[in-house]
């Protein structure tokens, strides 16, 4: 491969760097070298530069991808001498274009804190149910028909049902005891549709609080729940390391696969995946989902090893 070395060294580091690079490459400028070199040779150059590096050292290495394009391979020394792709900045400004103070001294920080606090206080009211308290006292491995954050969201919706403005529902919370005296929350909850919450109908700040309440642990499965009901929806997740990436030591990142099932036969109504090559894998599973495949069908399918697709076929 053909590589180009660029030196931005200063003081004594400049002489040391030139001496090393002159031994491996042709100097085509005062601070630029180019040569054809192997991976082992390139690694040797990097090691030698690191051994002699000081605060004044700054060397970038670029690999020629095509006749017109190069890519940054590595930087030894002071990375601030180069930008994120290894180029040397030639223009500077004293103007504050980042305005980091906007992040650290935001005008609305106190308002955000208040909203987050309200959502945190409301999030756990769903744990006051008899079933949840029994689990805490006695213990149980049985799953809840409705998760506590969903119950909390439903209770919040009922409490602000007659409020058309943010001022109105905030006033409700400030005088919650008075509101509870005039409203039987148990009757309201038993007569309500437990599987649907209309967040869009709430005032703006209430919508924000509602989403914070219900998404503290995980986003709700809105479409599946709306179509099949909260009780009938289950999810299964697999996290894994793609075998090809792990063996090749190439950009090792974990992948995640999740399926959403509905009904007694656990028909697959949703498949989600994040990771290497999942875009191509999902095409086949999308077709299978369209024809009504179930979780059992997936588990009975013979897996091809070692491929990432096998992770779609075995869920606990």
Image: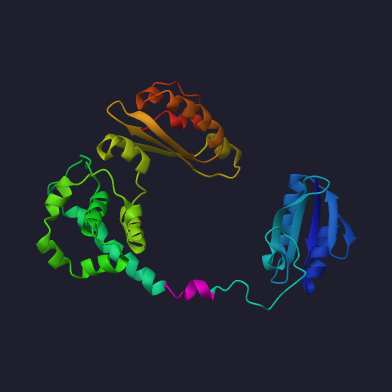
> Residue 155 placed where, x, y %?
21, 54
> Residue 232 placed where, x, y %?
27, 34
Along the line of sight, which residue is nearer the eye, 55 or 85?
A: 85
Picture residue at 52% right of the left edge, 73% below the top: 102
Q: Which residues are magenta?
A: 101-108
**Which quadrant of the figure has residue 245?**
top right
Picture residue at 82% right of the left edge, 48% below the top: 68
Picture residue at 24% right of the left edge, 52% below the top: 154
276 displayed left or right of 69: left
Residue 116 vertical placement versus 311 (above, below)? below
**Residue 306 in sight from this viewpoint:** no
Picture residue at 77% right of the left edge, 69% below the top: 90
> Residue 269 placed where, x, y %?
38, 32
82 displayed left or right of 291: right
Along the line of sight, which residue is nearer the eye, 264 or 40?
A: 264
**Which image quarter is the C terminus in?**
top left
Along the line of sight, which residue is nearer the eye, 194 or 119?
A: 194
173 displayed left or right of 282: left
Residue 280 vertical placement versus 80 (above, below)? above
Q: Residue furthest bottom?
A: 94
**Residue 182 in sight from this viewpoint:** yes
Along the line of sight, which residue is nearer the eye, 197 or 141?
A: 197
Q: How many marks?
A: 0
Residue 178 vertical placement versus 144 (above, below)? below
> Residue 5 placed where, x, y %?
80, 57
């Amino acid at each position: 491969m053909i590589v180009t070395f660029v030196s931005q060294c200063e003081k004594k580091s400049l002489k040391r760097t030139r001496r090393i690079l002159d031994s491996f490459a042709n100097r085509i400028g005062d601070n630029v070298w180019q040569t054809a070199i192997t991976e082992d040779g390139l690694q040797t150059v990097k090691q030698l530069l690191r051994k002699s590096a000081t605060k004044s050292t700054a060397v970038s290495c670029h690999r020629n991808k095509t006749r017109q394009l190069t890519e940054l391979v590595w930087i030894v020394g002071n990375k601030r001498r180069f930008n994120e792709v290894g180029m040397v900045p030639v223009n500077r400004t004293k103007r504050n274009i980042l305005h980091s103070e906007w992040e650290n001294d935001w005008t609305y920080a106190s308002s955000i804190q208040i909203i987050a606090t309200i959502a945190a206080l409301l999030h756990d009211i769903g744990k006051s149910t008899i079933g949840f308290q029994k689990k805490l006292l006695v213990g149980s491995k049985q799953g809840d028909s409705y998760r506590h954050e969903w119950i909390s969201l439903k209770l919040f919706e009922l409490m602000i049902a007659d409020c058309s403005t943010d001022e109105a529902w905030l006033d409700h919370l400030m005088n919650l005891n008075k509101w509870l005296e005039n409203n039987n929350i148990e009757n309201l909850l038993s007569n309500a549709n437990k599987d649907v919450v209309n967040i869009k109908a709430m005032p703006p700040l209430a919508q924000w609080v509602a989403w914070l309440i219900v998404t503290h642990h995980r986003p709700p499965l809105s479409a599946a729940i709306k179509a099949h009901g909260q009780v009938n929806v289950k999810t299964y997740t697999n996290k894994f390391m793609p075998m090809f990436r792990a063996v090749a030591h190439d950009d090792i990142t974990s992948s995640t696969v999740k399926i959403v099932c509905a009904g007694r036969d656990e028909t697959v109504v949703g498949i989600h995946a994040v990771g290497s090559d999942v875009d191509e894998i999902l095409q086949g599973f999308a077709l299978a989902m369209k024809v009504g495949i179930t979780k059992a069908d997936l588990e009975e399918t013979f897996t091809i090893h070692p491929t990432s697709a096998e992770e779609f076929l075995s869920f606990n």
